[in-house]
Amino acid sequence: MSMQACRNALMDIVRENGTNAGLLLASYLRVPVKTEQNEQTGQGDHPNERKALFKATGKAHEDIQLQSVYQKAFSRRENTLNKLTSYSEKLTVKDRLIIGLGGENVLETGIALHHTYGTPVIPGSALKGLAAHYCDQVMGLSQQEFKIKGVQDTNDKGDVIFRQGHYHHILFGNNDDCGFITFHDAWIMPECLGRDKLGLVEDVMTPHHAKYYSGESEVPSDFDDPTPIAFLAVAGTFQVFLSCEDSSDEGKRWLGLAMELLVTALENWGIGGKTNAGYGRLVRGNTPVTMQSTVNVSLNSSNEEWSKAKLTWIPGSRKLEAFGGPNQKIASIILPQNDNSIFESLNEMLRNRLLVKKAKIEADVEVARVGNSLYLVRILYSTPTNNV
């Protein structure tokens, strides 16, 4: 009875005058999620009420006072973080982004919004988790010290143990102590609020086998009715901030590496829900992000050139290895899917020999050194006569 009394009190409130989208979504749904079906439409009141609530939340970001307050808060936060040893990037959502889709919510779908301003936000914990996983799964393939666990070592007694990689520990920490890098929440840019097709945007998903997914039916059938479910997604540009407690040049290099890891993961893997459907990708302007730039930007001061290194392409893991240098070592890089820009300096014959025939070739390369690890940055030059 008290629940319905609260809903009845909402009937006279003009939700379109609200300025906090998060508060509207949490407290201003006027009907239960499951309502009895209308005899004419065959549906309850909830779908239409849901759409009306979504429109009200979108209109909240058009409020001039909200935009002014958020702009001041954004600038104050930016100035504060810039006083730290920090790096920032402005990353744009390629299509749509949905964070907190499965979070607890009065609706069937949730979304992460700033508690005070009701604006879209990407939690720093989500950014850190993505970067840590990408570091383990991609960088860890070529250098074990970037792995989260499974690095074989021996303890003081000579027993074999498996530990966290040293570089992964520096960047992300573990259960016993925190890493040196702080991943701050990413805030949406103020200019994205209240603009058409930016900020909060309405979207829809259509599960075709709702009874099967909910356990009411053992076998999905072609006779199942699709169930459109409206939800809110995000479009626009976010400001991403990372900071480091070490203000030395070495600390800044680690900070740069962490940022490039994160940016690469956001473009190639995405963040949040429905990434398999293309949601959650963020890009740095129109510049493709690859692990080449990760090493080149962050560790340029430690780079060296190898003449006539032997290149080997491993297509299964998209791993490119270079064997050479003064001490005859191996440097490698794991390339993102559909990114072959590192091979642009090779002529067609050598690209075909390396990528199609899986044969080794010789080339001059640039290599970056991180501690005892070597990363292939780029291919500098190769001649048509090279044939290993």
Image (cartoon, grey):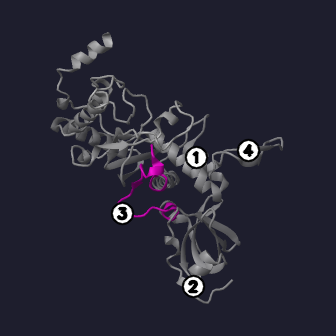
Q: Amino acid at mark 4?
A: Phe
Q: Say whether residue 51 is left or right of residue 227.
A: left
- In the image, what residue type sits under mark 2? Met
Vertical order, 164 against 307 (above or below): above
Q: Which residue is mark 3?
A: 286
Name the one closer to the observer, 333 or 280.
280
Region of the chain picked out in magenta, as a range: 266-295
Q: For residue 276: magenta?
A: yes
Distance CA(mark 1)–CA(mark 4): 17 Å
Location of residue 218 with respect to 312 vertically, above or below? above
- Point out which mark residue 56 bears: none
Among the two numbered marks 2 and 4 on one chain, the one whose residue lies closer to the N terminus: 4
Q: Secondary structure at mark 1?
A: helix
Label 2 with label 4: CB-CB less than 8 Å: no
Mark 1: which amino acid? Ile
Q: What residue is pinned by disc 4? A: 162
Residue 231 can be seen in this image:
yes
**Of the image marks 4 and 3, the number of the one nearer the N terminus:** 4
> Is residue 194 on the magenta stretch?
no
Q: Nearest to the eye among marks 4 and 3: give it.
A: 3
| Circle 3: residue type | Asn
Helix, strand or loop status at disc 3: loop
Q: Earlier in the sequence, mark 1 or mark 3?
A: 1
Tell me the mark number nearer the camera, choosing from 2 and 3: 2
What residue is pinned by disc 2?
349
Badge 4 local density, few (<14 within 10 Å), some, or many (20+)? few
Mark 2 against mark 4, which lies toward the viewer?
2
Q: Label 2 neighbourhood size at 10 Å, few (<14), some (14-19), many (20+)?
A: few
State the CA–CA distance, disc 4 to disc 3: 41 Å
